[in-house]
């Protein structure tokens, strides 16, 4: 049953040192506020899972929260590399980072398998691809009907998944609109699910019958954090802050500048600051 | 050195449409790439140079092309180029938006996509692409973003087009990592791995147009862009370049193509400068 609570409490109750944690959102509805709260609480030794590892994992890894990253893309989309992830991989700063790297097709299938309660995912992939040679979690199965050899990867079962969504109703049902990404699968695959939302409404009205709604009983905790996906966006609420993504490339290029930025915008900030950050992005 | 200029029927009439403005090699690359696409294509679009080319095609000669971005947007028609593969503009203008697992499992793996259009950090003569690491995988000199959707885009789309600016760092004799498999070691290597799609079928650089040799599958230069010499192509390529028996000259951009591209880039630059507080 979804419980409404302030974000610091939702993180404290649901994210533990050493957890396998997914913060999902495929370029849209990225749970930045939840990631920042995790950084403020100094959670450590996480196994972070995410398809499009972008700014929030650059920040979490740069602050030393993670010991391992399970991912399928680690870039600043449309801009370039993730400089804090690079520093961790290439130089072990601020701590070494173990990588488990997949393709998007593999991780999407692995979340789907997790949501479906299956032990592994099967798909036609990785043929000729170098990842199959360097990642021991990529294996194969032979189809019992056709003898075709197909790729297999273990199902993803996060201890906790964090997502951001447009709105919840008073009961705690959650509506996701626009690019829905992998969020439904990531929530259903996880033991616990924490959702930050732009707003709470009394009840949903006028929804399309096929709208993407996560029932309240699939969710552990909900926190209301307007703007909580910044600098990504919330469809129908605010636009993607592309300039912030471009600027991040410079901020993350230098360890000192990165730490100073994190102090100002994360360590000494609060979830309430997000609303102001999206004010010009209507 | 001899460049043959093939003039299509009606060329003189078309000549009036050719741009009288100067153009740069990057614009020529994007426009040459856009010409490879048709209204019948269902195209999985990579970000960056492929995205620009696909949208120029849609705004000029291929208005009915279906553009698909891996965020799940199908039949999208953005007014500005997206910075990421999941910008709101893509969803706002799409015919429909599906989830990411549906995109990869039903639409891509299901064989519904005719062309995958990719960029590359490193490519070799057989169209194998590396966007993962420079150096050893476990001790990389440079850790690049990795493949994202590319490994399965490369194997599941009907064929693959690649576009990138030429450089010795980018066009290499041996790639450091097989992010996405092209023609492997050439010949029938794809079929031997059980990959039934055609693979890399076109390479468009800022200097030339390349097609794979039908037997060896090595990329061969079939056209040079206006003003480009064979030496310029060889000097910016890390392998010994082969030229086809007949090397054509790429027709220069038309007024419509150039204006469309420039207006698209201007709208895009203005949109990406908007920001929050």
Image: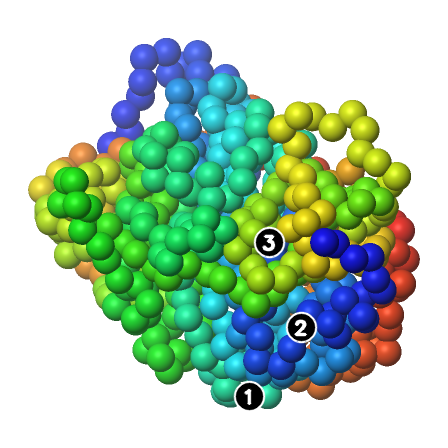
Residue at x 16% of width, y 40% of height: A145
Chain of the residue displaying label 2: A
Q: Which residue is mark 3?
A: A187
Mark in the foreground, 3 or 1: 3
Whole-angstrom CA distance, mark 3 to mark 1, is: 29 Å
Q: Which residue is mark 1?
A: A95
Mark 2–mark 3 Cα distance, whole angstroms, equals: 14 Å
- Element marked by disc 2: loop
Compared across the picture, whether A3 is left or right of B221 comes to right
Q: Nearer the viewer, residue A136 or B219?
A: A136
**The residue tagged with tag 3: helix, strand or loop?**
helix
- Identified at 81% across, 65% down, the residue is A7
Left or right for A282, reference B136: right
Which residue is identified by label 2? Answer: A15
Compared with A259, B99 (above or below) is above
Comparing labels 1 and 2, the label whose residue is closer to the camera: 2
């Amino acid at each position: 049953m979804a419980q409404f609570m302030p974000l610091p409490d939702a993180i404290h109750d649901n994210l533990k040192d050493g957890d396998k944690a997914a913060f999902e959102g495929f370029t849209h509805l990225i749970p930045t506020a939840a990631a920042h709260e995790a950084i403020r609480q100094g959670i450590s030794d996480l196994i972070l899972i995410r398809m499009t590892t972008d700014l929030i994992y650059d920040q979490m890894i740069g602050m030393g929260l993670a010991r391992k990253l399970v991912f399928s893309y680690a870039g600043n989309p449309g801009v370039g590399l993730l400089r804090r992830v690079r520093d961790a991989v290439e130089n072990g700063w601020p701590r070494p980072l173990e990588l488990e790297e997949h393709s998007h097709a593999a991780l999407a299938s692995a979340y789907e398998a997790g949501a479906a309660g299956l032990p592994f995912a099967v798909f036609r992939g990785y043929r000729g691809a170098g990842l199959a040679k360097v990642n021991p979690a990529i294996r194969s199965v032979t189809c019992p009907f056709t003898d075709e050899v197909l790729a297999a990867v273990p199902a993803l079962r996060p201890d906790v998944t964090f997502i951001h969504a447009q709105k919840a109703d008073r009961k705690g049902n959650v509506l996701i609109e626009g690019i829905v990404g992998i969020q439904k699968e990531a929530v259903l695959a996880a033991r616990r699910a924490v959702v930050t939302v732009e707003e709470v409404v009394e009840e949903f009205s006028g929804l399309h019958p096929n709208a993407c709604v996560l029932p309240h009983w699939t969710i552990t905790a909900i926190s209301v954090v307007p703007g909580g996906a910044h600098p990504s966006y919330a469809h129908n609420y605010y636009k993607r802050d592309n300039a912030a993504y471009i600027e991040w490339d410079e901020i993350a290029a230098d360890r000192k500048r990165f730490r100073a930025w994190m102090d100002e915008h994360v360590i000494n900030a609060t979830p309430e600051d997000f609303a102001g950050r999206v004010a010009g992005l209507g | 050195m001899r460049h043959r200029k093939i003039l299509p029927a009606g060329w003189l009439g078309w000549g009036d449409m050719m741009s009288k403005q100067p153009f740069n090699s990057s614009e020529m690359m994007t426009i040459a790439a856009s010409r490879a696409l048709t209204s019948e294509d269902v195209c999985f679009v990579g970000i960056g140079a492929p995205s620009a080319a696909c949208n120029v095609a849609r705004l000029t000669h291929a208005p009915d092309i279906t553009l698909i971005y891996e965020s799940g947007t199908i039949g999208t028609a953005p007014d500005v180029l997206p910075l990421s593969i999941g910008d709101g503009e893509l969803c706002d203008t799409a015919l429909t938006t599906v989830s990411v697992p549906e995109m990869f499992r039903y639409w891509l793996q299901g064989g519904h996509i005719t062309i995958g259009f990719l960029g590359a950090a490193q490519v070799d003569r057989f169209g194998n692409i590396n966007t993962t690491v420079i150096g050893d995988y476990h001790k990389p000199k440079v850790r690049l973003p990795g493949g994202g959707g590319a490994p399965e885009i490369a194997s599941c789309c009907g064929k693959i087009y690649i576009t990138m600016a030429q450089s010795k760092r980018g066009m290499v004799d041996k790639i450091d990592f097989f992010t996405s498999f092209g023609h492997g070691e050439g010949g029938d290597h794809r079929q031997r791995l059980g990959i039934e799609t055609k693979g890399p079928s076109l390479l468009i650089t800022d200097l030339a147009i390349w097609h794979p040799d039908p037997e060896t599958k090595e990329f061969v230069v079939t056209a040079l862009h206006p003003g480009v010499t064979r030496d310029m192509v060889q000097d910016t390529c890390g392998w010994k370049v082969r030229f086809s028996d007949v090397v054509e000259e790429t027709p220069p951009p038309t007024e419509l193509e150039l204006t469309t591209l420039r207006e698209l880039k201007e709208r895009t630059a203005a949109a990406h400068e908007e920001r929050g507080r």
